[in-house]
Image (cartoon, rainbow, N blue to C red):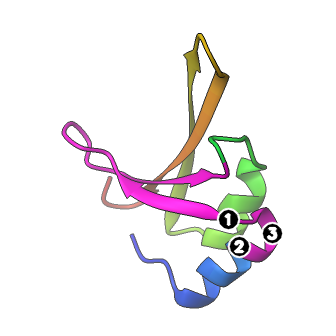
Amino acid sequence: MRISFEQLVKIKEEFGEYDISKVIGGSNDFYFRFGYWRPVDAGKLQEILGETNLVVEDDIYDDDCGYLFSYKIKDKYFG
């Protein structure tokens, strides 16, 4: 997975503030979280990140907050 500084700037311009974190255990994938776990256009994020990265939208339901969205980034060719 490679993400350039220019791509990060474009993501901020398109979607606003975000955090990048890493899943602990299991897949160890990196993921983006926008605002307070809000949904974004996964297709647009995929377009910005390009064809070598694969965007996977992930959501979980929280009883207090409703659905929480994050976007895992996987290397399209190496898992």
Answer whether residue 34 is magenta in the image. Answer: yes
- Of all residues shown, which one is farthest toward the top? 63
- Marks 2/3: CA–CA distance: 5 Å
Q: Quadrant of the N terminus?
A: bottom left
Q: Which residue is mark 2?
A: 12
One can see residue 75 in this view? no
Query: Which span is picked out in magenta?
Result: 12-35
Question: Residue at the spot x=58%, y=17% of the render?
Answer: 61
- Of all residues shown, which one is farthest toward the left? 25
Residue 12 percent across, percent down from the top left: 71, 73
Task: Tell me if mark 3 has few (under 14), some (14-19) or many (20+) residues whose alpha carbon lies within 10 angstroms of its own.
Answer: some
Task: Determine whether 64 is above or below 2 in the image.
Answer: above
Task: Tell me if mark 2 has few (under 14), some (14-19) or many (20+) residues whose alpha carbon lies within 10 angstroms of its own.
Answer: few
Instruction: Name the one closer to the observer, 3 or 19.
Output: 19
Q: Which mark is residue 17?
A: 1
Side of 1 relative to 58 (left or right):
left
